[in-house]
Image (cartoon, rainbow, N blue to C red):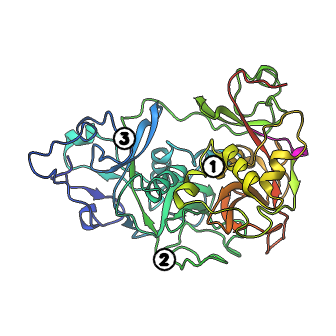
């Protein structure tokens, strides 16, 4: 359906047809297009989408933004900066902007973010236009993916679930991290950066950067910035929910007593804070509850020495980043580890009467950071949960020698050597362990 449409990228100067775009030829007449290509229904991850992209995510049911995400199957060079190095694309006071920036990470927010970028005059607020009026009506525009949307694409690609001509280069997202920083992702290893808060020494902005930064300890060289465009379908039917940001724990209601009627920000059944609601019952449960500050442990390694934990495959490592995998990750680490580990501490440390605590996965801990870290002031602990601005271990292995840790100053996640007990530069803060647990509706344990 793209043939003859005259695709053009506004504000970047180069048409998609000049960016090694894949052929839109359907092939021999005897090869019928799939239902997904024809109608946008019955799609599956890995198939061609209605506008020639690659379907890389299925939410399982219709959401406010649509159900499926498809990505343009090639990486596109960027002929300009993300935006101005000065100021935010959002208005309002600091607290409101920070809440919006945290919400802007989420799945479904890419189009909203890109519209905000364009409205604020950010150079990379890209719009894709179709040559025919009918196609303008049929299809929503392509846009820059949010932080979490781009990570979904990377994970699907690197695990072999989708195929495309994406390059191992730095790729912009549409998510603003702080007023003068935006998120980007290295398609070399999946790390997502903002370069803020001392990660790049004395950096004041990255929005005007034309190349990625060289990070201490990384083998990846600085490279020109790129983008991958995505779109959601069917057309969205609602509006973004209000940011689920938590500055104070809610103690009223039935969540703490009966595990019913729970919402993000509620006091959980085990005395922690509910930081995630899947919206429906999953095989692992529905809610994630992060433990209270009293259950936090400090100065522990992920493992007693590098490679102390038996290796798993690259596909298994990618799968082990997801929401719902923390308990299984922890069980494996405790079972197979030969030395005291962060996982062992999370699973066996004293934390109330509940015994089902685990070390959260990369994506699980990120949910806690997303909803709790926005209201931190300077170097204080978060008002809800009491999280430090330093590094917290996850249960997700990076490459057998390093593991993913989360920087709670701004939610950046990095791989760190498994035997480290503290950060090796800057303030040299000890590595921390904060347990988490999952539960379903009505699941209360004695």
- Asked if residue 142 is among those painted magenta in the image, a careful observer would answer no
The quarter in which the C terminus is drawn is top right
Q: Nearer the viewer, residue 190 or 397?
A: 397
Instruction: Please tell me in which quadrant of the rendered image residue 338 appears.
Output: bottom right
- Left or right of residue 382, residue 123 in this image: left
Name the residue rendered at 63%, 45% in the picture.
Answer: 325
Q: Which type of secondary structure does the marked residue at label 2 adopt?
A: loop
Outermost residue, left direction?
29
Disc 1 vs disc 2: which is toward the camera?
1
Q: Earlier in the sequence, mark 2 or mark 3?
A: 3
Q: Is residue 86 above or below residue 436?
A: below
The image position of residue 89, as x and y in percent, is: 56, 54
Residue ID for mark 1:
363
Q: Nearer the viewer, residue 270 or 412?
A: 270
Q: Earlier in the sequence, mark 1 or mark 2?
A: 2
Disc 2 vs disc 3: which is toward the camera?
3
- Left or right of residue 42, residue 158 in this image: right
Q: Which mark is residue 223?
A: 2
Could you tell me if the residues under marks 2 and 3 are in contact, i.e. CB atoms within 8 Å? no
Name the residue rendered at 53%, 63% in the picture.
Answer: 185
Label 2 vs label 3: CA separation? Answer: 33 Å
Q: Which type of secondary structure does the marked residue at label 3 adopt?
A: loop
Q: Residues within 10 Å of mark 2 (few under 14, many from 20)?
A: some
Q: Is residue 296 above or below residue 16?
A: above
Name the residue rendered at 24%, 49% in the picture.
Answer: 130
- Left or right of residue 251, residue 141 in this image: left
Q: Which type of secondary structure does the marked residue at label 1 adopt?
A: helix
What span is in magenta? Answer: 289-295
Label 1 vs label 2: CA separation? Answer: 27 Å
Q: Is residue 294 above or below residue 239?
A: below
Residue ID for mark 3:
44
Residue 94, can we see it? Answer: no
């Amino acid at each position: 359906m793209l043939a003859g449409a005259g695709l053009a990228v506004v504000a970047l100067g180069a048409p998609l047809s000049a960016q090694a775009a894949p052929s839109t030829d359907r092939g021999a007449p005897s090869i019928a297009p799939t239902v997904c290509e024809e109608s946008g229904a019955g799609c599956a991850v890995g198939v061609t989408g209605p506008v020639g992209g690659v379907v890389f995510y299925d939410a399982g049911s219709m959401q406010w933004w649509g159900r499926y995400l498809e990505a343009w199957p090639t990486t596109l060079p960027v002929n300009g900066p993300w935006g101005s190095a000065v100021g935010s694309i959002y208005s309002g006071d600091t607290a409101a902007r920070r809440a919006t920036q945290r919400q802007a990470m989420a799945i479904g927010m890419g189009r909203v973010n890109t519209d905000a970028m364009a409205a604020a005059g950010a150079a990379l607020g890209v719009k894709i236009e179709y040559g025919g009026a009918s196609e303008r009506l049929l299809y929503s525009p392509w846009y820059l993916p949010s932080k979490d949307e781009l990570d979904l694409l990377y994970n699907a690609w690197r695990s072999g679930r989708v195929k495309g001509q994406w390059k191992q280069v730095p790729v912009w997202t549409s998510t603003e991290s702080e007023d003068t920083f935006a998120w980007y992702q290295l398609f070399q290893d999946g790390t997502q950066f903002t370069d803020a808060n001392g990660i790049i020494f004395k950096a004041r902005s990255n929005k005007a950067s034309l190349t990625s930064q060289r990070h201490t300890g990384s083998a990846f060289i600085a490279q020109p910035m790129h983008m991958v465009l995505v779109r959601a379908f069917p057309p969205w039917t609602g509006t973004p929910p209000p940011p689920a940001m938590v500055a104070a724990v809610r103690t009223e209601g039935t969540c703490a007593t009966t595990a019913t009627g729970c919402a993000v920000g509620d006091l959980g059944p085990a005395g922690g804070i509910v930081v995630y609601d899947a919206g429906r019952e999953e095989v692992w449960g529905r809610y994630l509850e992060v433990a209270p500050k009293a259950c936090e442990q400090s100065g522990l390694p992920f493992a007693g020495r590098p490679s102390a934990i038996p290796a798993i495959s690259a596909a298994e490592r990618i799968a082990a980043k997801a929401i719902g995998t923390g308990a299984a990750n922890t069980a494996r680490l405790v079972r197979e580890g030969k030395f005291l580990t962060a996982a062992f501490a999370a699973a066996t440390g004293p934390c109330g009467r509940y015994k089902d605590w685990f070390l959260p996965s990369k994506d699980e801990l990120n949910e806690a950071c997303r909803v709790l870290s926005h209201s931190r002031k300077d170097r204080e602990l978060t008002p809800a949960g009491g999280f430090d601005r330093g590094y917290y271990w996850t249960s997700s292995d990076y490459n057998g020698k390093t593991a993913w840790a989360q920087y709670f100053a701004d939610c950046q996640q990095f791989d760190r050597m498994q035997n480290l007990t503290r950060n090796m530069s800057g303030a040299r803060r000890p590595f921390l362990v904060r347990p988490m647990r999952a539960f379903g509706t009505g699941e209360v344990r004695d």
